[in-house]
Image (cartoon, rainbow, N blue to C red):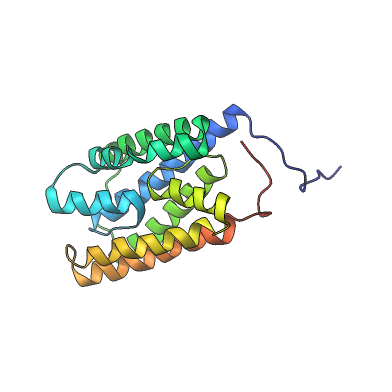
Amino acid sequence: MTPDLSTPSRHSLPEDIFAMLIGTTLVSLGIVFYAEVQLTTGSSAGLALLLQYATGWPFGVLFFLINLPFYVLAVLRMGWPFAIKTFACVGLVSVMTVQFPVWLDISDVEPLFAALIGGGLMGLGILSLFRHKASVGGINILALFVQENFGIRAGYFQLGVDLLILVAAFFILPFDRVIYSILGALVLNLIIALNHRPGRYVGFS
């Protein structure tokens, strides 16, 4: 018998945990690609990357600290389950981005390849988290809030914010790295905009 795919089904806790692990792994791997060739992206991850290049501080520490203020919005607007999942996801990304270079050597990678593949990995990872009511914090939280309350697609809203962060990158990174970063941001946000919208996916957490 063919299942009724139009009927929403609730994700189980193991499904949520598995999606969070897969999502944060993809996001972390994309960030490692970016950090290796000095690219940036949008949201809090992009801001943390820029600060890492400018200050030398570890990405994981910066990423975790930048996201702290957004947990207030997560609790007030999205609820405790979302906030707890997001806190866990931010923690996982902070740890994984430190460990991945130990486990995997990608010291020789073309910047354009890193931009496109890294952006795709991050887009798929964020999409996985969104579908299980989680995020990697920062602008992702604000983007989900805007979509659910004002009908503006999360991907399009985040794209606008990401462009502002990429403009700031012109003052820190070489010109070609910013162009590659913009291409990666387009890939990331198109994945979210095309796939995270009402009716496209009926599961819920």
Does residue 188 appear in the picture of this structure?
no
Nearer to the camera, 49 or 113: 49
x, y percentage for residue 110? 29, 64
Residue appearing at x 53%, y 60% in the figure: 193
x, y percentage for residue 142? 44, 49
The single residue placed furthest to the left in the displayed view is 55
x, y percentage for residue 134? 50, 39
Nearer to the camera, 125 or 74: 74
Residue appearing at x 46%, y 60% in the figure: 157
Q: Height in image: 6 above or below 181? A: above
Left or right: 112 with respect to 19?
left
Residue appearing at x 35%, y 33% in the figure: 91
x, y percentage for residue 197? 61, 56
Nearer to the camera, 43 or 2: 43
Q: Height in image: 9 above or below 195? A: above
Q: Height in image: 149 above or below 194? A: above
Q: Quadrant of the N terminus?
A: top right
Left or right: 7 with respect to 48?
right
Residue appearing at x 38%, y 63% in the figure: 184
Q: Height in image: 186 above or below 144? A: below
Does residue 171 appear in the picture of this structure?
yes
